[in-house]
Amino acid sequence: MASTCIITLLIFERHSGCLLAARLRPGRVVSHARIIPLLLRIVPRLQCEFPKVRIQLRADAGFATPLLYEFCEFFGLQYAIGIRRVAGPESGLHVLKACRKNLRETIRAFDAKQ
């Protein structure tokens, strides 16, 4: 028996919570698929209706593509898009451990001078 997974893409207005757009997508589609065409229908209308309002876009890391960044820059949008997690030795845990080690060494050096 085959199962179907549907993923929703929802766009809300921040202050009122008003739903601006909704799209149902098959679960096998990458998260950023079809976001630009959807935004192309919304953003110019909002800018036309509210020319003095600064539009801000927030999205999770699944939408972090060069095309979305270019879109935001082209339309003058402020944006906060999540950054994809880096695997391997550059991961956040590795950085935290290095900071902790550095902090311990700094504390030891400070204590030695006292």
Image: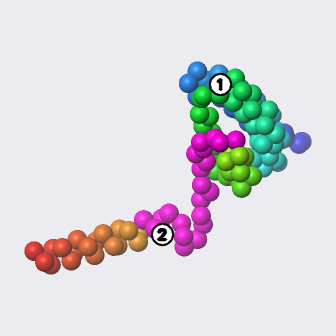
Residue 24, picture quadrant = top right
Q: Distance between the residues labelled 2 and 1?
A: 45 Å
Q: Position of residue 69 (x, y in %)?
A: 68, 51
Q: Mark 1 points at which residue?
A: 50
Q: Please rate how many residues cluster around mark 2, counting C-alpha atoms within 10 Å: few if below 14, some from 14 to 19, many from 20.
A: few
Of mark 2 and mark 1, the one earlier in the sequence is 1
Mark 2 vs mark 1, foreground winner is 1
Quick one: 63 or 79, which is closer to the camera?
A: 79
The magenta span reads: 75-96
Q: Position of residue 90 (x, y in %)?
A: 54, 70
Q: Where is residue 60 in the image (x, y as percent from the top left)?
A: 63, 46
Image point 72% across, 27% down: which residue?
48
> Count of labels shown?
2
Decide if residue 33 is in sight here: yes
Quick one: 29 or 13, which is closer to the camera?
A: 13
Taking the image as shown, residue 107 lies to the left or right of residue 113, namely right
Dot 2 amino acid type: His
Decide if residue 6 is in sight here: no
Image point 59% across, 50% down: which residue?
82
Quadrant where the image shows the C terminus: bottom left
Residue 94, numbered circle: 2
As displayed, is residue 54 above or below residue 85?
above
